Image (spheres, helix red, strand yellow):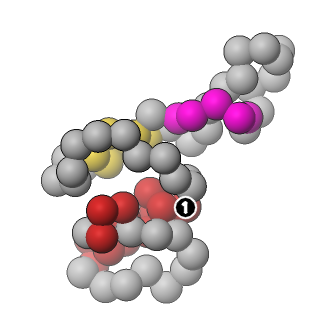
Amino acid sequence: MILCADHGVDPTTPSTDHSREYSPLMALGLRRGRYDGCQEDVGATAFALLTAEKPPLGGRVIGGA
């Protein structure tokens, strides 16, 4: 199971657009700890875990799953 937000929110601006802030990521079956990477890595990891194949698009598989 992978849970994540679609973007962070910069508390110094009135907008809720994608911003510089981090978004939370919780994933069962992956190594514990902080992960600093791109949002596209979440999609690549989900694809790899669900299909056991290399993702066809951009993104790095988190933890080499």
Q: Position of residue 19 (x, y in %)?
A: 73, 34
* In-front residue for pair 59/6: 59
Residue under the image location 55 percent in, 61 percent down: 40
Residue under the image location 44 percent in, 57 percent down: 42
Question: Does residue 32 appear in the picture of this structure?
Answer: yes
- Residue 17, by quadrant, is top right
Q: Is residue 26 positioned above or below 40 on the image?
A: above
- Residue 9, by quadrant, is top right
- Is 54 part of what is drawn in magenta? no
Q: Position of residue 44 (x, y in %)?
A: 44, 69
Q: Position of residue 26 (x, y in %)?
A: 32, 39
Left or right of residue 21: residue 42: left
Span colored in magenta: 19-23
Q: Position of residue 39 (x, y in %)?
A: 55, 53
Question: Does residue 46 appear in the picture of this structure?
Answer: no
- Split into 4 quadrants, where in the image is the C terminus? bottom left
Residue at image mark 1: 40
Say which element carries label 1: helix
Residue under the image location 82 percent in, 17 percent down: 13
Q: Is residue 16 positioned above or below 4 on the image?
A: above
Report the magenta stretch's main SS.
loop
Q: Is residue 16 positioned above or below 57 on the image?
A: above
Amino acid found under the numbered disc labelled 1: Glu
Q: Is residue 2 positioned above or below 48 on the image?
A: above
